[in-house]
């Protein structure tokens, strides 16, 4: 890598960090705190409102991460194509990122189903009560699981980004290009 790509790298990393951190805080902090609200009729509504406030920031984080990621792929296209392990990491990370976009969108969809029922009784943000309307209860039951999938996926994206950073060490570049060359010569 002959030139610095600080801006696109920062966009990629900060976008992923915000996406990961926001999804984890929402599942633990926002949903957990909403479950402690004294009035059961306000629990799901307050959580849905908090997620709705986060949604535009989260969308910006995802967009910034995607733009940064595409910029890094463009800047490192020769390494992605030629250095052993870089293309595989990039492919896996792209697929996991797309899965995280899907779970983020699906979580938002489930949250909107809960919010559309307005003020209704619930044991928690993702725990319906016997008085919760059926559609909202079904969405809460799904969201109780899905809320953890996005932080796992986005955390994995952060880890794979760290691995890509390690692949840029001079020793890794030389070894990776050497393996690629030996594979090509063996054919």
Image (cartoon, rainbow, N blue to C red):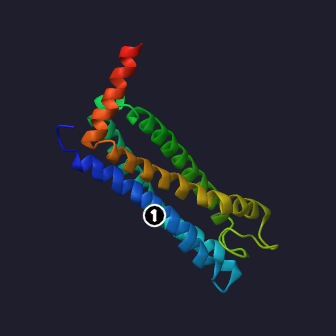
In which quadrant of the rendered view does residue 41 lie? bottom right
Name the residue furthest right.
130
Quadrant that contains the N terminus = top left
Query: In the rendered image, is residue 82 in sight?
Result: no
Question: Which residue shows up at 60% across the image and 60% down it?
Answer: 148
In which quadrant of the rendered view does residue 129 lie? bottom right
Q: Residue 149 vs residue 122: left or right?
A: left
Q: Determine whether 40 is above or below 28 in the image.
A: below
Q: Determine whether 88 is above or below 138 in the image.
A: above
Question: Which residue shows up at 46% across the image and 35% down it?
Answer: 91
Near-viewer residue (70 or 85): 85
Q: Where is residue 106 in the image (x, y as percent from the top left)?
A: 60, 51
Near-viewer residue (143 or 145): 145
In the picture of the structure, the residue carrying the numbered disc 1 is 21
Query: In the rendered image, is residue 51 in sight?
Result: yes
In which quadrant of the rendered view does residue 149 lie? bottom right
């Amino acid at each position: 890598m002959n030139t610095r790509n600080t801006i696109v790298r920062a966009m990629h990393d900060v976008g992923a960090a915000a996406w990961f951190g926001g999804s984890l805080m929402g599942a633990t902090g926002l949903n957990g705190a909403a479950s402690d609200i004294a009035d059961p009729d306000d629990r799901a509504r307050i959580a849905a409102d908090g997620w709705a406030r986060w949604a535009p920031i989260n969308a910006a984080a995802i967009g910034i991460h995607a733009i940064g990621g595409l910029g890094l792929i463009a800047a490192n296209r020769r390494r992605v194509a030629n250095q052993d392990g870089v293309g595989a990491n990039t492919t896996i990370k792209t697929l996991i990122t797309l899965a995280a976009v899907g779970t983020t969108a699906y979580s938002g969809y489930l949250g909107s189903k809960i919010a559309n029922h307005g003020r209704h009784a619930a044991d928690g943000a993702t725990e319906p009560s016997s008085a919760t309307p059926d559609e909202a209860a079904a969405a809460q039951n799904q969201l109780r699981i899905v809320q953890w999938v996005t932080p796992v996926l986005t955390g994995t994206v952060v880890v794979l980004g760290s691995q890509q950073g390690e692949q840029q060490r001079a020793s890794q570049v030389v070894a990776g290009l050497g393996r690629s060359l030996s594979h090509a010569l063996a054919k």
